[in-house]
């Protein structure tokens, strides 16, 4: 396998690296944070599945917030749904947004050009704390691969009750919070139940490199007013 570094950025959280990978299979872009593989442009099934499964939970997902831009595949799948009237994506790494905008990530400019999209460069916890109540129908958290696979240690707070309560506040009546996880996460399920009064762990099969992988989607819904 051969690698060529395309872009690198340093922040208070460490380094973010975009590199090109070439070998026996198709050439791919690969995103790494502090040396840890995050995602690439070959295996995108999990991002697409997350978006589609979450969108199916609502009849009218008009206003959607995504925590985490990554390489834009979750976002692309959300924008492919004609029911979505506005989507906000919150990404903490300014450099990653820049690489999507300037074409360093080739498909980036077309994705970010969608008129329904707004991009906020911030910690998703800070962004949601500053958001008005009942602003969204759907909040999708795609920051990590669940609480067991954190990109940054500080992200552990995103799976605990204080932040989950913030998510509930920004959701409209019957709005949905959907969180993706590579493994079962009983503590997350308990925290979501504590905040919303309900949580469903949905099993999702995803095909990666001709093999079936098992993921989980944790879903809570704001109850209808009595």
Image: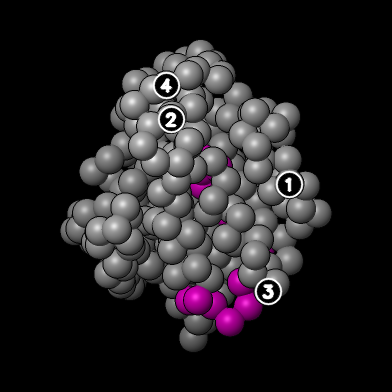
Please state the horizontal and vertical placement of residue 205, each as a whole percent of the image.
29, 67
Query: What residue is disc 3 on?
Result: 83
Residue at the spot 56% in from the left edge and 37% down from the top edge: 91
Distance of mark 3 from mark 4, alpha carbons?
40 Å
Distance of mark 3 from mark 1, alpha carbons?
19 Å
Residue at the spot 54% in from the left edge and 51% down from the top edge: 73
| Tag in front: 3 or 4 | 4
Distance of mark 4 from mark 2, alpha carbons?
6 Å
The furthest residue to the front: 24
* Front residue of 75 and 129: 75
Task: Locate residue 181: give its quadrant.
Answer: bottom left
- Check disc 2 and report its element: helix, strand or loop: strand
Residue 151 vertical position relative to residue 168 in the rendered view, above or below: above
Query: What residue is disc 1 on?
Result: 110
Q: Which mark is residue 3?
A: 4
* Front residue of 23 and 71: 23
| Tag in front: 2 or 3 | 2
What kind of secondary structure does the magenta stretch mostly adopt? loop
Q: Which mark is residue 175?
A: none
User: Do residues under tags 4 and 2 come within 8 Å of each other at their CB atoms?
Assistant: yes
| Tag in front: 4 or 1 | 4
Query: What residue is disc 2 on?
Result: 22
Residue at the spot 63% in from the left edge and 78% down from the top edge: 60
User: Do residues under tags 4 and 1 come within 8 Å of each other at their CB atoms?
Assistant: no
User: Do residues under tags 3 and 4 come within 8 Å of each other at their CB atoms?
Assistant: no
| Tag in front: 2 or 1 | 2
**Dot 3 surroundings within 10 Å: few (below 14), some, or many (20 or more)?**
some
Residue at the spot 31% in from the left edge and 37% down from the top edge: 150
* Front residue of 33 and 209: 209
**Dot 2 surroundings within 10 Å: few (below 14), some, or many (20 or more)?**
some
For marks 4 and 1, the one nearer the N-term is 4
For marks 3 and 1, the one nearer the N-term is 3
């Amino acid at each position: 396998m051969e690698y060529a570094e395309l872009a690198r950025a340093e922040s208070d959280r460490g380094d973010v690296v975009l590199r090109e990978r070439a070998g026996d299979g198709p050439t791919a872009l690969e995103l790494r944070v502090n040396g840890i593989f995050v995602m690439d442009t070959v295996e995108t099934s999990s991002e697409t599945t997350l978006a589609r499964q979450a969108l199916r939970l609502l009849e009218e997902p008009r206003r959607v917030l995504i925590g985490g831009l990554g390489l834009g595949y979750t976002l692309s799948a959300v924008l492919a749904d004609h029911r979505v009237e506005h989507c906000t994506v919150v990404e903490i790494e300014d450099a990653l947004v820049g690489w999507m905008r300037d074409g360093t990530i080739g498909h980036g400019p077309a994705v970010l050009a969608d008129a329904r999209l707004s991009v906020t460069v911030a910690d998703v916890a800070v962004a949601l704390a500053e958001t008005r109540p009942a602003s969204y129908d759907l909040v999708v958290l795609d920051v990590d691969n669940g609480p067991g696979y954190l990109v940054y240690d500080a992200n552990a707070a995103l799976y605990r009750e204080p932040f989950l309560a913030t998510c509930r506040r920004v959701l409209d009546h019957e709005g949905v919070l959907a969180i993706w996880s590579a493994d079962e996460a009983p503590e997350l399920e308990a925290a979501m139940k504590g905040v919303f009064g309900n949580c469903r762990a949905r099993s999702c099969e995803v095909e990666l490199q001709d093999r079936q992988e098992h993921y989980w989607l944790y879903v809570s819904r704001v109850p209808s007013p009595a």
